[in-house]
Image (cartoon, rainbow, N blue to C red):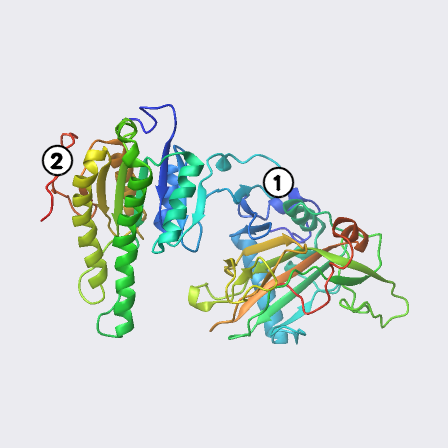
């Protein structure tokens, strides 16, 4: 399915953690075909945006083709409810709707559980960033936009993709593994609850994205999920996923609701 | 590389030394230009080696008033690859890149922050600078007989001329490969009352990268903080006449010293 089908308007995407390496890569991959809102916490994405453009220092007034597809960058701490609400408000004011929400939590960190109790607090904060904030952001969009536009949701094939990063085994990876497990379960639950709205929800659990080929695979998978019909699918890029609502026919399936 | 490659006369000649032709133009928190991997690897290596030679010979130069750093100002007697920054071609390219009209007067300095250097403070670099008047050359560097910050002359033959900083440029070089824990960043601020430790944006001192901006009443920047490694840079200012500054922003905008690029 074309990413610009079902409507003459370009698809509108919202990518979170856009300033990270994965976030910047996602912005670069999507900017040509999507109107993009790039949410970042501290470092903006390294792509042309409303407040930054590329230029040729030898011919500084010449047009530069890379600036044609600028993203709309918004600084927001998504663990803050006012920031999340402001982000959604700005995205809708700027583009009118959001067709693809990419909750990007692809860059995990390791924290020992026994070295310092403070690291447990940091790990808990990681759960909020990786799990709670994405669910809240999707709920905000559902509340202020999608609930009132079921027809538009189906027409535009709207989709949420939750991306969570690699989680190693052993010491230091407890919270990353917990995030990954929680996002997997929540994504399937979200798929069930968003289905009546006509919004699909899928997830990608990615491999180590310091590897360029892994990053390419993540981008490719994201685009496939957005363009397809699946919901409730969890694609594990470090192994083949066989979870409910997955693969094969491309037909939308009713995902099992986790109990 | 050809002998004298560090004296390009035009931006087109500078282009041959550049690694690529994609620099960033930002508008927030004030208009500025950034670029990484500025020069070709062989060019950067020559610049770095020249800087390290100076550092080795001098230990980093003399302490700079109001700032926890040491440095030296390049004058006409300074030779070698670092004169690239005193070339006519570089001057024209930077002026065009920042969109500023500049005069022939250029101050080029080498800066060395020792490890754990004190933080700086937000300042706009809209400061005066004095040179020995010379209308004949396209680039006129600081004159050792004319004090840059006061215009006081130790040579009766010198004719001090007052200028105002128009463009500031920091080129980072000869640093350890930067990691966030090294600190040493240049902070960009919205106001001179901003907390120096909380800039709106930071420019990390990646080797072979630069930050440049037109000096305006709002170009607030500063050295955020030192860290476990030294931070080295080449800092330069291009200038304009005081009349041009008055015409654009009125009286009272030029600030005294305490200032200096971060």
Along the horizontal axis of the image, is A82 left or right of A59?
Answer: left
Residue A119 position in % (x across, y down): 28, 69
Residue beneath disc 2: A254
Instruction: In the rendered view, tell whether residue B27 sits above or below residue A92.
Output: below
Give the image location of residue A138, x and y in percent: 29, 44
Which residue is located at x 64 percent, y 61 percent? B235
Are callouts 1 and 2 both on one chain? yes
- Towards the viewer: B225 or B229: B225
Percent from the top left, x then y, of residue A92?
40, 38
Mark 1 crowd level (few <14, some 14–19, many ≥20, 10 Å Cα)? some
Residue A115, visible in the rendered structure: yes
Can I make out residue A213 in this image? no
Q: Is residue A157 above or below residue B132?
A: above
Q: Regarding mark 2 in the picture, which secondary structure is present there?
A: loop
Foreground tag (1 vs 2): 2
Residue at position x 55%, y 67% from top? B196
Residue A60 is labelled as 1
Question: Could you tell me which secondary element the residue under label 1 belongs to?
Answer: loop
| Residue B220, quarter of the rendered image | bottom right
Q: Examine the image and state in which quarter residue A255 appears.
A: top left
Q: Say left or right for B64 vs A237.
A: right
């Amino acid at each position: 399915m074309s990413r610009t089908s079902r409507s003459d308007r370009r698809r509108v995407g919202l990518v979170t953690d856009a300033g990270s390496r994965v976030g910047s890569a996602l912005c670069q991959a999507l900017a040509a075909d999507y109107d993009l809102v790039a949410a970042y916490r501290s470092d903006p994405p390294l792509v042309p945006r409303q407040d930054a453009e590329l230029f040729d220092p030898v011919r500084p007034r010449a047009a530069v083709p890379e600036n044609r597809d600028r993203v709309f960058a918004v600084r927001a701490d998504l663990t803050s409810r006012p920031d999340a609400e402001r982000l959604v408000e700005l995205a809708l004011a700027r583009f009118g709707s959001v067709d693809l929400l990419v909750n990007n939590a692809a860059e995990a960190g390791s924290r020992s559980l026994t070295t310092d109790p403070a690291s447990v607090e940091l790990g808990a904060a990681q759960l909020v960033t990786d799990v709670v904030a994405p669910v809240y952001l999707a709920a905000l969009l559902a509340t202020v936009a999608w609930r009132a536009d079921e027809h538009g949701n189906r027409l535009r094939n709207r989709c949420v993709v939750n991306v969570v990063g690699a989680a190693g085994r052993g010491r230091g990876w407890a919270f990353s593994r917990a995030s990954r497990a929680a996002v997997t379960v929540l994504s399937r639950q979200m798929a069930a609850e968003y289905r009546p709205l006509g919004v699909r929800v899928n997830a990608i659990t990615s491999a180590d994205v310091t590897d360029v080929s892994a990053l390419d695979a993540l981008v490719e998978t994201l685009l496939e999920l957005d363009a397809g019909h699946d919901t409730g699918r969890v694609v594990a890029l470090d192994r083949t996923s066989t979870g409910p609502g997955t693969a094969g026919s491309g037909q939308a399936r009713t995902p099992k609701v986790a109990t | 590389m050809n002998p004298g490659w560090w004296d390009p006369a035009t931006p087109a000649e500078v282009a041959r030394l550049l690694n690529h032709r994609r620099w960033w133009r930002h508008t927030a928190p004030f208009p500025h230009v950034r670029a990484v991997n500025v020069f070709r690897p062989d060019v950067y290596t020559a610049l770095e080696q020249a800087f390290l030679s100076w550092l080795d010979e001098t230990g980093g130069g003399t302490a700079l008033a109001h700032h926890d750093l040491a440095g030296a100002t390049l004058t006409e007697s300074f030779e070698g690859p670092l004169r690239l920054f005193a070339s006519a071609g570089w001057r024209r390219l930077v002026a065009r890149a920042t969109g500023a009209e500049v005069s022939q007067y250029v101050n080029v300095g080498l800066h060395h922050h020792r490890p754990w250097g004190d933080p700086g403070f937000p300042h706009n670099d809209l400061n005066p600078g004095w040179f020995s008047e010379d209308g004949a050359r396209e680039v006129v560097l600081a004159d050792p007989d004319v004090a840059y910050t006061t215009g006081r002359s130790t040579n009766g033959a010198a004719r001090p001329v007052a200028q105002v900083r128009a463009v500031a440029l920091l080129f980072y070089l000869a640093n350890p490969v930067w990691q966030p824990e090294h600190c040493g960043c240049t902070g960009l601020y919205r106001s001179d009352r901003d907390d120096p430790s909380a800039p709106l944006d930071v420019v990390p001192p990646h080797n072979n990268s630069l930050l440049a901006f037109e000096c305006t009443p709002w170009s607030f920047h500063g050295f955020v903080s030192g860290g476990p490694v030294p931070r080295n840079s080449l800092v330069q200012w291009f200038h304009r006449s005081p009349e041009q500054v008055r015409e654009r922003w009125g009286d009272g905008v030029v600030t005294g010293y305490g200032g200096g690029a971060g």
